[in-house]
Amino acid sequence: MSRETAPPAWTRQPGARCRAIEHLTRLEGLQEFETFAGLGEEFFQALAGAVTALEVGEGTSIYREGEPSGSVYLLREGRIKLYRTSRRGRAQILNVLGDGSVLGLSASLEGEPRSHGATALTDCGLYVIFHNELTDIMQRFPGASVRLSRVLAREVRELEELVGDLVFHSAPQRVARMLLKLATEEGRVTKQGVVFEPSLSRHEMAEATGISREALSRTLSRLAREGILALDGKSIIILEPAGLRARTGDP
Amino acid sequence: MSRETAPPAWTRQPGARCRAIEHLTRLEGLQEFETFAGLGEEFFQALAGAVTALEVGEGTSIYREGEPSGSVYLLREGRIKLYRTSRRGRAQILNVLGDGSVLGLSASLEGEPRSHGATALTDCGLYVIFHNELTDIMQRFPGASVRLSRVLAREVRELEELVGDLVFHSAPQRVARMLLKLATEEGRVTKQGVVFEPSLSRHEMAEATGISREALSRTLSRLAREGILALDGKSIIILEPAGLRARTGDP
DNA sequence: GAGGAACCGTGATCCAGATCACGCAGAACA
DNA sequence: TGTTCTGCGTGATCTGGATCACGGTTCCTC
């Protein structure tokens, strides 16, 4: 749809062609975010004018816990883990984000230091926006403001679910849940079952489930021994999704 | 400041006096919410026109987990616990709210069922607003929208801290933290120490720390035996705040 | 191609905290 | 005035999962 509208006035300025193209790709990229679906052209123009595109490699830290929080990030593509660490070096993964996610919003809005860290699990394409520019856009486009509130509302719900998961379910149950979540996000269905190469290492899978690496290994081996999983090098095949679901502790 | 402005036009309509007074008190009540501090008179008028005042007794359920979420609540005064339950009857308290808190926002914005329950720990005075009226106000007053986003951002941060607390700290450490949090919110300083009658029963204190009631009792007794607390009937006296802080596991 | 340095699996041990079991006190109620 | 009930403390037992210890594999680096 945006392709049909005339390019904005400044694209005609001499020497601006390059910038214009850059802006157009950003526009296209930003319009793919489901969070903003249905918002007007004006909003996307404003947003495209405020963001900077950013490519980062696997393993790059986007921001760290405790840092001052200047920016909000829009994840165009890639996977990113959010985590919290203890002073004794342990970590807990709070969430694993995929394409179209918004990150760094909560701390930025509060003006507080980052309450969690974020690092890229894969190569990522991001848009960055300074927090005051975002606040400005939120003031100008109330619709955007409501969308971003919904992003936070979703984060609240997911964190509440994480808390429930941690206190109500046993380690094997949490492992089963994590596998199912990862599989729906990263797996592809084959005739053997759902195959995926987890974006998380065993160590990280343990951090995501809140157990030790050893306990995670044991649980996976056990599931493999029981024929529910197959472990093939780096990839995991869920042979019996139903069996896995039966071990989540859900109804 | 609002007292100095003329009452709105409709207060002059015949038979409207009662409503007017009711609205004025609501206005005053709403203007005390720190969340909305600094917002304009117009906003408060709109909000006052949309909310309903509500008084509920101790023990009343405001909303339950899984219910459809129609409304948002503004807690004028009282204390309310937010909790999440497992099918096996266990519960985890997610937060204990006090005067000036906003509750029920996240589920309402998402249009999802309640992700947690809320019940009054004391008699409470609340304002209720239907979610579509709130969305309407958010669209009309972008400033309000940003404030409510900040409320959610704070919830996100607090939940992330809860997760960290649950996975990184031992039961005694979590008990110490909970006591300090309760004491700052409910305690008064005397020459013996900080005295308070917790709004939570022992059972609920256990649910808030994510341990069993027995383990909580034992931890409290132990702290009393060590001279850090004194347990006097229903009230708790923190004799050695420093000693308690030393047991939180923080730096 | 030798030597780290991460990763990963697995066995053995240990302990924090759940669970079970009980007795007591105060409140509600007849 | 007993009677039931709900909340609370505490002892005894049991166990899930942390921790420790070790060997194997892959990959990177020199």
Image (spheres, coloured by chain):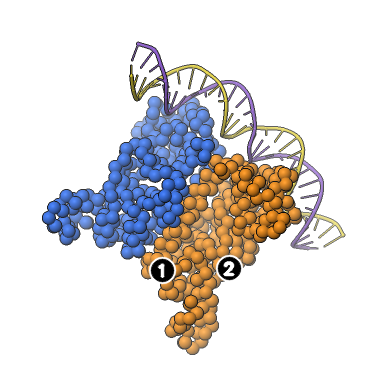
Chain colours: A orange, B blue, C yellow, D purple
Label 2 Cα neighbours within 10 Å, binned few <14 / some 14-19 / many ≥20: some
Of A13 and A241, nearer the camera is: A241
The numbered mark at residue A125 is 2
The numbered mark at residue B223 is none
Residue for point 68% across, 44% down: A219
Q: In which quarter of the view is residue A109 placed?
A: bottom left
Could you tell me which chain the residue with mark 1 belongs to? A
**Percent of width and height locating residue A124:** 60, 66
Residue for point 17% across, 58% down: B10
Question: At label 2, which amino acid type do we have?
Answer: Gly
Earlier sequence position, callout 1 versus callout 2:
2
Question: At label 1, which amino acid type do we have?
Answer: Ile
What residue occupies the far front of the structure in this picture? A191
From the image, which quarter does the N terminus of chain B lie in? bottom left
Label 1 Cα neighbours within 10 Å, binned few <14 / some 14-19 / many ≥20: some
**Percent of width and height locating residue B44:** 27, 57
**Percent of width and height locating residue D29:** 75, 62
Q: In which quarter of the view is residue A112 placed?
A: bottom left
Is A184 placed above or below B78 here? below
Q: Secondary structure at mark 1?
A: helix
Task: Residue under label 1, please give it.
Answer: A137
